[in-house]
Amino acid sequence: MPLTSTDAIVGPAYAGASGVGAFNVVQIEHAEAIVAGAEQAGLPVILQISENTARYHGALAPIGLASLALARAAAVPVAVHLDHAETVALVHEAVELGFTSVMFDASRLSYAANVAATREVTEHCHRADVRVEAELGEVGGKDGAHAPDVRTDPAEARAFAEATAVDALAVAVGSSHAMATRDAGLDFGLIARLRDSLGIPLVLHGSSGVDDANLAKAVAAGMTKINISTHLNRLFTRAVRERLLAGPDATDPRTYLGPARDAVASEVARLLTILAGR
């Protein structure tokens, strides 16, 4: 099956005011679980690989090529996306490997430097027909500008999107990265204003901190791409821990990684259904 482009997944969702799940891959079991969950739900999905994960594996290629292979073999549309890349070299490598979208994160820079760097990345990626997601100021949880009480300004976001020509924008509306509890308070009115102002898909980072009902509300208000990582990692780790506690003499990783993979697959299927409004 040919690789699905991110645009072929995000574009229809944006036009139809529905949501798309984008789940982070840490190791191959995550990628397998996410694809299996999407197949169970019969819905498209996005596999995300962050710069931190590429560093964990020593390079982007090993986990990136594995994810691309799984995406091509999937029975549903699956796209592969580079998440939170802070280096231009990694963006270029992702494009060369065949990723169909990248998230370039220059949010630690000043506004002017962020615009300049992001615009350069966008021009490079668009020449290869690769979508670009960016971030205006850091989303909470990374010691950046977007503390829990800070929000993205619609006028500034629109100016940034126009200056950089990005295809999607991650915005700060009340969620934070790496939340261990699902109690983030989202500003739904701001989400609606941002959607009306920008005219491009909005991305909700830190969605692990948002409960089911508010995920659905966020999509209804105007969010399109919903990024989830920590929530699935907690489920994965809990399943591994339970198996090892039940069988402390286990030596075959498949006996505990397999059940963890299954747990994540089930949750991915459930979350995709919520985001799709089913």
Image: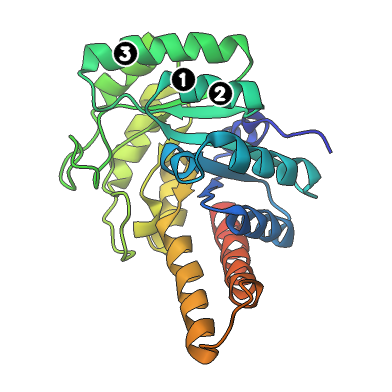
The quarter of the picture where residue 19 lies is top right
Q: Residues within 10 Å of mark 2 (few under 14, many from 20)?
A: some
Badge 2 marks a residue whose secondary structure is helix
Question: Between 19 and 30, which is closer to the camera in this rendering?
Answer: 30
Say which quarter of the image contains residue 150.
top left
User: Which is nearer the N-term, disc 3 or disc 1?
Assistant: 1
Residue 110 on image: x %, y %: 20, 18
- What residue is at 44 percent from the left and 40 percent from the top? 55
Q: How much space separates mark 3 and mark 2, taking CA atoms? A: 21 Å
Q: Which residue is mark 1?
A: 89
Q: In the shown orientation, is residue 27 left or right of residue 220? A: right
Locate the C terminus by quadrant. Answer: bottom right
Mark 3 to mark 1 CA distance (whole Å): 18 Å
**Seen in the image, is 45 located left or right of residue 271?**
right
What kind of residue is marked 2? Glu
> Which one is in front, 117 or 38?
117
Point out which mark residue 240 bears. none
- Residue named by callout 3: 115
Residue position marked by numbered label 2 in the rendering: 93
Give the secondary structure at mark 3: helix
Residue type for callout 3: Val
